[in-house]
């Protein structure tokens, strides 16, 4: 039984004996890889976990536009500007698919936004860090989108249908994002000594925050066991972090850049890299709301929400008029 096989990480998943009949039937569907759809019965915890994870993911896509958008007007060439614009637009699209997927669970986008703005809901820790130079846009694409792909490719097989389907398109676009980031890094790494220095500096600043994107270490992950039993998550946080390090080290070597970790080395026995953990005190502080750019990010989201009120009002008024016209026509 899958739920009992799950590694005990943080809080455990319910055992089969602890489940009600409905919950057992539900778990059987999950174990048989049958997708759960919006109208199907689901345990409250399953619904709540999905709303939390999908909502947090949607918020991250939207907040993620801010550090990237910061460089649209300063991109070094027209071509780079067009590529970055397309990327930032993609992030908006990802946010919209994800908010729509969350809405199928009975929560409105307004509710989710209110929870983000009041600090009740989180967004990815990574977007608390500033993009100080053009090389940071390369590092964000290479490392941040790279980490996002590592996390999100398995989510294409997640048990909730609308989430899994949204992930398919998102992952295709994230691959393009990762390549555009790596392409910027290649240009910088092969450029002038100053450009090379900027590329190394961006890697130095984004390495550990990228490792944090996968969440706390398995022993501190409160949701992993139950989320994995429900196939809302497919891998543990540490498994994905390790895969990310193993994938990224040769990419850094190819660029001729140095990952800022003295303990990073290939381990013949495990067939993987050993590496230093990020500073978990910093991570928990960031997700508590004390990240370096949190106030700036939240102010920008608040302003966008307030500035957009007239659009939402207009759309609702138009919807009401159309509904009234339809009723009158009948
Ligand atoms: N940042 O029990 P755990 C993107 C929270 S990429 C903030 O392991 P879970 C993008 C966690 O919510 C980023 N908070 O949790 C990329 C929980 O707190 P609550 C978005 C984090 O949910 C490029 C607590 O720590 N991707 O959008 O099992 C360009 C304990 O953690 C973080 C996704 O969201 C973090 N890094 O696992 C543009 C992917 N890590 O909620 C945009 C889907 C942990 O109980 N999400 N926390 O208060 C996931 O796969 C999982 O939610 C996580 C965390 C792996 C992130």
Image (cartoon, helix red, strand yellow):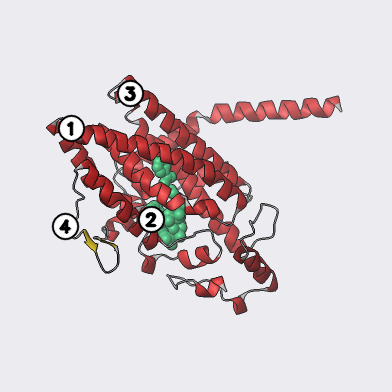
The quarter of the picture where the N terminus appears is: bottom right
Residue at (58% x, 57% y) in the render = 159
Residue beneath label 4, please? 262
Measure the C-alpha gap from mark 3 to mark 4.
Answer: 37 Å
Measure the C-alpha gap from mark 1 to mark 4.
Answer: 23 Å
Residue 214 image label? 2
**26 shown above or below 245:** below
In the image, the residue with mark 3 has its CB under 8 Å from the nearest atom of ligand 1: no
Instruction: Tell me where residue 263 appears, x and y as whole percent.
Output: 19, 60
Q: Earlier in the sequence, mark 3 or mark 1?
A: 3
Pick the front one: 299 or 64: 64
Instruction: Tell me where residue 156 appears, x and y as whole percent.
Output: 53, 51
Q: Earlier in the sequence, mark 1 or mark 2?
A: 1
Mark 1: secondary structure: helix
Residue beneath label 3, please? 73
The quarter of the picture where the C terminus appears is: top right
Residue beneath label 1, please? 195
Residue at (42% x, 62% y) in the render = 236
């Amino acid at each position: 039984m899958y739920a009992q096989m799950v590694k005990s990480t943080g809080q455990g998943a319910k055992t089969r004996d602890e489940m009600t009949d409905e919950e057992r039937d539900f778990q059987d569907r999950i174990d048989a890889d049958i997708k759960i759809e919006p109208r199907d019965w689901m345990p409250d915890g399953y619904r709540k976990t999905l709303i939390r994870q999908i909502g947090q993911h949607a918020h991250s896509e939207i907040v993620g536009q801010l550090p990237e958008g910061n460089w649209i007007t300063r991109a070094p060439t027209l071509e780079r500007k067009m590529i970055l614009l397309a990327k930032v637009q993609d992030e908006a699209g990802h946010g919209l698919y994800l908010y729509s997927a969350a809405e199928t669970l009975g929560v409105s986008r307004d509710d989710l936004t209110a929870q983000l703005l009041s600090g009740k809901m989180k967004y990815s820790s990574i977007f608390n860090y500033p993009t100080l130079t053009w090389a940071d846009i390369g590092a964000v694409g290479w490392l941040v989108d790279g980490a996002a792909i590592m996390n999100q490719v398995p989510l294409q097989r997640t048990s909730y249908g609308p989430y899994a389907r949204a992930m398919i398109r998102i992952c295709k676009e994230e691959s393009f994002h990762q390549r555009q980031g790596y392409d910027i890094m290649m240009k910088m790494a092969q450029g002038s000594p100053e450009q090379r220095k900027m590329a190394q500096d961006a890697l130095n600043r984004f390495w550990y925050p990228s490792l944090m994107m996968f969440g706390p270490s398995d022993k501190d992950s409160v949701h992993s066991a139950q989320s994995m039993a429900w196939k809302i998550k497919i891998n543990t946080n540490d498994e994905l972090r390790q895969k990310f390090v193993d994938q990224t080290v040769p990419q850094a070597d190819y660029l001729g850049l140095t990952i800022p970790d003295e303990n990073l080395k290939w381990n013949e026995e495990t067939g993987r890299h050993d590496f230093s953990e990020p500073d978990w005190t910093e991570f928990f502080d960031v997700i508590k709301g004390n990240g370096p750019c949190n106030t700036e990010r939240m102010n920008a989201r608040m302003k966008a929400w307030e500035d957009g009120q007239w659009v939402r009002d207009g759309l609702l008024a138009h919807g009401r008029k159309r509904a009234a016209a339809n009723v009158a026509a009948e």
